[in-house]
Image: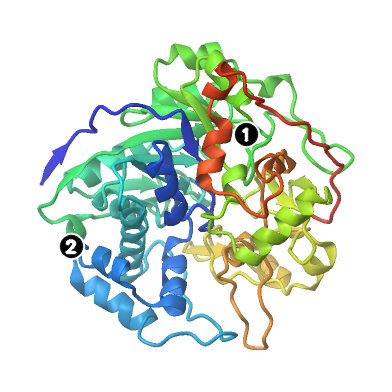
Amino acid sequence: MNATPSPTIASPWLIQGGMGIAISNWRLARAVAGLGQLGVVSGTAIDAVFARRLQDHGVDDELRGVLDRFPVPAIVEDALHRFAHVRRRAGAPYKSVAMLHAHSPRRGFDLVVLATFVEVALAKLGHGGLVGINLLTKVQIPTAASLCGAILAGVDYVMMGAGVPTHIPGVLEDITQGRPSTLPFSVTGADSDHPASSLTFDPTPYVADATLRRPRFIGIVSSHVLATALFKRSNGPVDGFVVERPSAGGHNAPPRGAYALDDQGSPIYGPRDEVDFSVINALGVPYWIGGGVTSAADVVDALALGANGVQVGTMFAYCEESGMESDLRHRILRDLQRHCLTVSTSVTASSTGYPFKVVNEVGTIGDDDVYAARPRKCDLGYLREAYLDDRGHTAYRCAAEPTNVYLRKGGSVEATVSTTCLCNGLMATAGLAQVRADGYVEPALVTSGDRIEDVTALLGDREDYHARDVIEWLDPARVAAGAPATREVTTHTPTGILS
């Protein structure tokens, strides 16, 4: 096995956020990378995304070219036989991917490796720019397989948040060198030295004698305290950080220590949550600031603090290249122009316990009536909690599954209040909604940053905009040239059952 170090590359001033599930798809990442910035694909639930795309669209020439490059043809043929052999009829249920567990058959991990390889390889086609992948530390079981597929496809950056992934630099090195890697696995009721508290992944069946390049590792953190801990305790080099503020979309780190909620039920962040950028500057690695970046002036402010640039999600989430379902995306854009949308930060929506931002769009899970009407179900399982059952075996539960099932597994009723299935909701947002046997269609769940209404600055009199428009609007050179860098936007008070 041969390995090559990461090449010396210029740091981009803009990182496109890794929004999942499949909002940051290969089309968006390819567009951003082709314009000289860091395009990022989401690796969350990538095996299910790939399987559903195959059922809807089959294999075109571009995808076939990528599949032909995968080093294990038998894995490709197995996936195509399972999911592309017969096209799904409109209104029919998707054939599901089996939920992964710690000891799943290798076939399940094969699909993760292949799906991640395909997503990164498609994003890298047709340009010489940089492509990264974003993974959630909370989604533990497929992590190493996802990293393996991304490295096989030549990914340039790996980005991880929603936890403190001190073990990931070492895993990247192991995969690049073609050797087995052991990862910690959080299992409720098991000590860290319990046999159930670790996962092992062997990349050998996939990498063979390939020469692989270690990608750069960027930790997504919410404070200088976490940045310092990740930098000092990791089992390999940390090449930089994204410092994400609470105004960012998706999962947010909770406030430090005990915290209160405001009148809308959102967590209140205080002085302990303020970032000391002098501490992060002293670490001597590049960093980017994320959350609430919607203008060129915001980028200039970040650079003045010592950052290399910014990470931006929300503005890219509603551009034409985004993976968001087209009709939903256009409906949200129209509602934004009418100033009738809000974003709530819910401390209960996610089964992870992390605060999660929800757009209160009518017809989605952010709508009280839609939330109340949805049958509780967990059949994708990416955010399940592993625990030791009464027999000492590893089992799985989710606060979003039927309440009686969750309680039978030892869960608390308090954890189920206002909790929803992020996996199914986010899959629906990407146009991949599951259809149930009785015809029920899983509703979308839309997440965005607090400053979602700033997206209207990109529209003007148009009905749509592109990734190029986002980059040009945020370009700090506009400030130096004297161009308008901000726009006044009216904000509104959030409401809704998930707030």
Q: Is residue 351 left or right of residue 209?
A: right
Closest to the observer: 429 or 107? 429
Q: Residue at x 62, y 62 (%)?
A: 398
- CA gap, disc 2 to disc 1? 38 Å
Q: Earlier in the sequence, mark 2 or mark 1?
A: 2
Say what amino acid the circle numbered 2 marks: Pro
**x%, y% of residue 99?**
47, 69
**x%, y% of residue 394?**
47, 62
Q: Give the image quarter of residue 325.
A: bottom right
Mark 1 and mark 2 in contact (Cβ < 8 Å)? no
* Other residues around mark 1 within 10 Å, as few (<14) / some (14–19) / many (≥20): many
Against 143, residue 420 (above or below) is below
Q: Is residue 162 visible?
A: no
Kindly identify which numbered label has been placed on residue 74.
none
Kindly identify which numbered label has been placed on residue 71.
2
Q: Residue at x 43, y 48 (%)?
A: 31
* Other residues around mark 2 within 10 Å, as few (<14) / some (14–19) / many (≥20): some
Q: In the rendered image, which residue does mark 1 sit on?
A: 291
Q: Residue at x 29, y 39 (%)?
A: 215
**x%, y% of residue 211?**
13, 46
**Element class at badge 2:** loop
